[in-house]
Structures are given as structure tokens and as C-alpha cells.
Image: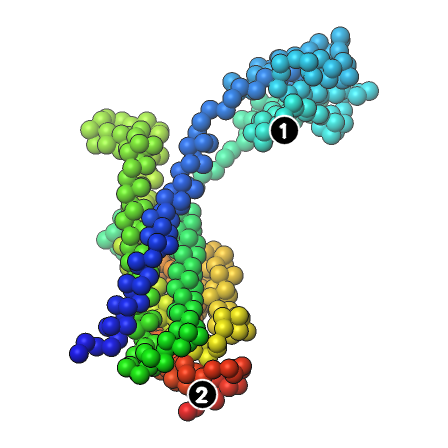
């Protein structure tokens, strides 16, 4: 006879992967995520429709200025027009926006900056407003400098922008590589959020599955053939394998989408990289593109992917054991709310402290949060892109595995008593008593 745990794993796995919702979410998940990343970038790169702007510049602040290609500026004569006549002209014209710059009784920069008006036949776009803000601020600053006897050119030449290139030093035999801190910060935060989502989503499925079988009394038939501990472990492993399969499919599909996007939407960048070895001196864009690829290569993606699988399994096993025990102790999912908050509070705390961990990935808070097994899956995934000492990874993993086995033993005691108990409102005090049986 086959191992009962293997039979339960097979049942849980097949019953979920055969559902249409699993197929839809597994296939559409990467597509939706890719659309959220690629479509805005494509739309942002499209040229904006030309918006003609008519200007009444009583202060002669920006005259002459032709504007940008998408925002050409044309001017009304302030000697022949005032605000009301200009507005009347604008409403019957083909212009898209009307900009009014007053002068007041005296040329006062503070008066001008607080009384500039922009009218549009539709809501003016943010890009248009930002462009006009920048243009007017520059002109007002130049005029204020001139009125105080300061040459704006001298001020412009005295402004210096510092662009520090940071590098990470390895061992004495390793060459320093350019730091990828911004990319690591984003990657760590996304990995932490994903590990939280995966652990919570699949652990809750374990609880719901236990409640469903208990409510329908199917569990009474199953328990007659297998022990409660075997049923609990089979359910945990079966649903966990569904999560791993779904994650691997997402990785494969995401890689394929990335290759397609790189081929069709980023051909120039890939061409610049290919020409680097064969051509002579690359231009600035080539160097910047290659620097990005060098920075990306400096990130240990195999370690991050392996860490994600390990901490997903470890965190999922730990929390699903607790959720399975809770599911066995209640009859309805609505009764689970009083128990779920204390169980999920450590994961919520790990998300709250994510910003601090990102800012100081090797600080004391990050270290201890990555050692505590109830927060380590999220915190350690945030830290992994930053290249933490390998001994911390092994120590954190060992503590997580040890805590899982201890938690399985405790959860098994609750599961054994609660799975066949009906019609009783369970409290934390009652659960503590079951642990002592």
C-alpha cells in the first residue's frame, strides 16, 4: 500500500491544478504584471499631441520664447489686449490653452508668481503644467538676479552637480563592481512582498481546506483510513507543491515575456551592447546601457531565486501548520478572524519594518528580524539582494527549519483533538489545554 501522506499530497495537488482558476491565474498573472510594467513605459515614450498655447505676457517675462515642440507658444500683444478680451478670444479660437502673466502696478516677482493663470478647454495635462512652471520659475529667477546686479550666467556656471559613482569592494582578489543599491532596494522590496503574498495565500488555503472537509464531515471518512498527523502533513505538502509549480511557471513565463519585450521594445539597447565588442569607442548612451547590464550581472540572481524557494517552503510550512491547527479547531471560516491576527502579526511587522531593513540591510534590526523564524522569510528576502554574509543565511535557515518541526509537533496536537470536534467555540485557553494532552 502506498504511503497515505503521498496519496493525500497527490489528491490535494491534482484537485487544485485541475481547476480553471489555477490555469487562469497562472497564465494571466505574468501577463498582467508585464502589462503593468511595459504598457506605461510604452505610453510614456509616445510623443504627446501638440497643444497650442496662446500667451498674454504683460510682464514681458518669457517673450520671446517659442516653447517646446509639443507646447508651441504664441503671443497676444499686451498693448491691445487685457485679460477679459484675451479670454474671449481664446474661447472662440483653436488654441488648447491660454497662459496669462500679469505685471501689476509694479514689476514685482512675488506678485507675478502668485497671479499667473492657465486656462484650458480641457483639463491641462500635468506635463504641460510642469513645463510652464519650470519655464516661468527660470525666467523669474533670472529677472530677480538681474535686478540685484547679478549675472545669471555667472550663477549658472557656478552651479555644480555631483554624481557619485559608488562601488562595492569584494575580497582582495576580486575587482570592485559598481553598486546597484537602487535596483537592489526595489528587488528586495518586491521579493519581500511576493514571499508574504505566497505564504499567506497558500497557508490560508490549507486552513480553508481543513474547515471545508470538517464542515462537510468528509474528514470523518478520511480519518478512518489515515492518522490526523498524516492528513495534516499531506494537505500542507500538497498545497505547497501547487505554490511551487505555480511560481516556477511564473518564472518561465516572465523570462519569456522579458525576452520578447527586449527583442521588440528595446532593440537599440541590445544592439548597442552587441556592438561594444566590435566597435571602437561607444557613445554615452552605449556606455550607460552597458553599465546597467554590468550592474544587473553583479546581482546574484540564482541566490535570490534559490532563497525565494527555500524561504517560501520554510515560511509556508511554518505558517500552514499553524493555520491547519486553527482550521481544525473551528467550524466556520468567520470564526477564524480572532485567531488569524496573532498568527499573521509577525509577517505584518516584517512588512512594516521593510523600509528600515532596506535602508540598513546589515543593521541590528535587519539581522534580528531575519533570525526570528516568524519574520525571517520576508526580512531575509529583502536582505538577500544586498549580498549578506552567507553564514547568516545558513543560520536563519537552520532556525526556520528547527522552528517548523517544533511547530508541526504542537500543531499536530491541536489538529488531533480539534479535527473531530464540532459545535464548540474554541478560545486560546482551550487551545493551550489541547497542547498539554
Q: Determine the residue located farthest toward the bottom in the rendered image.
A: 437
Who is closer to the viewer here, 393 or 254?
254
Asked if residue 195 lies left or right of residue 83, the reply is left
Q: Secondary structure at mark 2?
A: helix
Q: Secondary structure at mark 1?
A: loop
Residue 210 x, y percent position in the rendering: 40, 73
Residue that carries the numbered disc 1 in the rendered image: 123
Q: Nearer the viewer, mark 1 or mark 2?
A: 2
Residue that carries the numbered disc 2 in the rendered image: 434
Who is closer to the viewer here, 185 or 291?
185
* Residue ID at (76%, 13%): 85
Asked if residue 286 lies left or right of residue 148, the reply is left
In primary-sequence order, the first of circles 1 and 2 is: 1
Quadrant in the picture for residue 314: bottom left
Residue 342 visible in image: no
- For the N terminus, the image quarter is bottom left
Who is closer to the viewer here, 57 or 286?
57
Q: Determine the residue located farthest toward the right in the rendered image.
A: 105
* Residue ID at (40%, 77%): 217
* Residue ID at (39%, 60%): 198
Residue 327 x, y percent position in the rendering: 44, 75
> Is 117 situated above or below 189?
above
Quadrant in the picture for residue 132: top right
The alpha-carbon separation of the residues under discs 1 and 2 comes to 65 Å
- Disc 1: CA contacts within 10 A as few (<14), some (14-19) or many (>=20): few
Amino acid at each position: 500500500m502506498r504511503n497515505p501522506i503521498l496519496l493525500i499530497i497527490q489528491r490535494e495537488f491534482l484537485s487544485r491544478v485541475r481547476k480553471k482558476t489555477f490555469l487562469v491565474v497562472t497564465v494571466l498573472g505574468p501577463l498582467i504584471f508585464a502589462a503593468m510594467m511595459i504598457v506605461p513605459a510604452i505610453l510614456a515614450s509616445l510623443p504627446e499631441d501638440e497643444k497650442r498655447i496662446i500667451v498674454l505676457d504683460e510682464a514681458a517675462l518669457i517673450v520671446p520664447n517659442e516653447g517646446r515642440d509639443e507646447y508651441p507658444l504664441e503671443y497676444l500683444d499686451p498693448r491691445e489686449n487685457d485679460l477679459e478680451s484675451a479670454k474671449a478670444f481664446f474661447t472662440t479660437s483653436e488654441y488648447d490653452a491660454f497662459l496669462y502673466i500679469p505685471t501689476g502696478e509694479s514689476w514685482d516677482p512675488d506678485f507675478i508668481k502668485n497671479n499667473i493663470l492657465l486656462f484650458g478647454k480641457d483639463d491641462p495635462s500635468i506635463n504641460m503644467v510642469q513645463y510652464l512652471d519650470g519655464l516661468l520659475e527660470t525666467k523669474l529667477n533670472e529677472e530677480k538676479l538681474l535686478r540685484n546686479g547679478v549675472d545669471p550666467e555667472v550663477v549658472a556656471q557656478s552651479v555644480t552637480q555631483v554624481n557619485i559613482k559608488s562601488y562595492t569592494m569584494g575580497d582582495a582578489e576580486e575587482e570592485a563592481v559598481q553598486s546597484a543599491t537602487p535596483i537592489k532596494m526595489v528587488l528586495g522590496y518586491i521579493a519581500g512582498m511576493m514571499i508574504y503574498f505566497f505564504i499567506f495565500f497558500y497557508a490560508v488555503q490549507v486552513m480553508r481546506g481543513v474547515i471545508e472537509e470538517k464542515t462537510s464531515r468528509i474528514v470523518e471518512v478520511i480519518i478512518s483510513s489515515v492518522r490526523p498527523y498524516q492528513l495534516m502533513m499531506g494537505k500542507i505538502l500538497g498545497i505547497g507543491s501547487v505554490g511551487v509549480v505555480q511560481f516556477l511557471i511564473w518564472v518561465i513565463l516572465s523570462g519569456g515575456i522579458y525576452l520578447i519585450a527586449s527583442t521588440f521594445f528595446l532593440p537599440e539597447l541590445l544592439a548597442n551592447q552587441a556592438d561594444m565588442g566590435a566597435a571602437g569607442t561607444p557613445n554615452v548612451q552605449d556606455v550607460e546601457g552597458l553599465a546597467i547590464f554590468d550592474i544587473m550581472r553583479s546581482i546574484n540572481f540564482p541566490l535570490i531565486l534559490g532563497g525565494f524557494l527555500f524561504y517560501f517552503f520554510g515560511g509556508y510550512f511554518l505558517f500552514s501548520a499553524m493555520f491547519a491547527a486553527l482550521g481544525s479547531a473551528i467550524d466556520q471560516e468567520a470564526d477564524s478572524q480572532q485567531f488569524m491576527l496573532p498568527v499573521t502579526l509577525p509577517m505584518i511587522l516584517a512588512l512594516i519594518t521593510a523600509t528600515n531593513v532596506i535602508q540598513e540591510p546589515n543593521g541590528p534590526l535587519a539581522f534580528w528580524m531575519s533570525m526570528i523564524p516568524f519574520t525571517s522569510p520576508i526580512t531575509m528576502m529583502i536582505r538577500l539582494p544586498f549580498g549578506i554574509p552567507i553564514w547568516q543565511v545558513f543560520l536563519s535557515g537552520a532556525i526556520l527549519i528547527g522552528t517548523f518541526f517544533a511547530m508541526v509537533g504542537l500543531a499536530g496536537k491541536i489538529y488531533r483533538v480539534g479535527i473531530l470536534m464540532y459545535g464548540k467555540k474554541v478560545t486560546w485557553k482551550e487551545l493551550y489545554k489541547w497542547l498539554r494532552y
